Image (tube, rainbow, N blue to C red):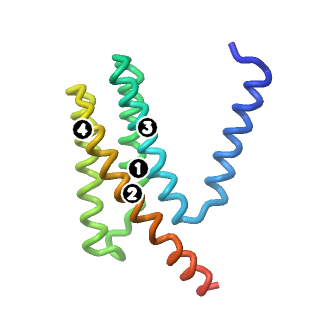
Amino acid sequence: MYSPGQAGANAYARVGVQTGVMGASPHRLIVMLYQGARQSIAQARMHLQQKNVGARGAAISKAINIIETGLQQALNKEAGGEVALRLDALYSYMARRLLEANLNQDESMLVEVDNLLATLEEAWVGIGPEVARTTAAAI
């Protein structure tokens, strides 16, 4: 099914992803979670347009999983205070909207969640230089 060259390229890509995760700072890991969720939503939109129900459901499930077990569980509600509590509620809302999007075959809900994630990703990337300075000063 796959040529030996393609299998090698796929293995290399997997190692690259694993190495990227293992070597990433906590800040970078959150960025990667946002990117992964958004990529899954983009795939879900494509599958919705192609009427590929199984693949659409799998992509939406992956996005929900990233939001709930990655982003939401990473929140420190004690240290994060009201901001963390609001993000927790927003992540729950996003997961619910993704489920509704799948059930109703509604692309606008997928776009809505992608836009919310894009805004959060942009803000998170924006604080990157400050996080790097703070981390460097602590060393």
Please state which of the two labelled residues, at mark 3 or mark 2, is closer to the viewer: 3
- What's under tag 4, amino acid-wise? Met
Label 4 crowding class (10 Å Cα cut-off): few <14, some 14-19, many 20+?
Answer: some
Q: CA distance from mark 1 to mark 2?
A: 5 Å
Q: Earlier in the sequence, mark 3 or mark 1?
A: 3
Mark identifier at residue 69: 1
Quadrant for residue 6, please give it. Answer: top right
The circle drawn on residue 79 is none
Distance from label 3 to label 1 (Cα)? 15 Å
Query: Is tag 4's residue or tag 3's residue first in the polypeptide sequence?
Result: 3
Point 29% across, 62% down: residue: 87
Give the image location of residue 72, x and y in percent: 36, 56
Q: Earlier in the sequence, mark 3 or mark 2?
A: 3
Residue indicated by mark 2? 73
- The mark total stands at 4
CA distance separating discs 1 and 4: 21 Å
The Cα–Cα distance between marks 3 and 2, rounded to whole angstroms, is: 19 Å
- Amino acid type indicated by mark 1: Thr
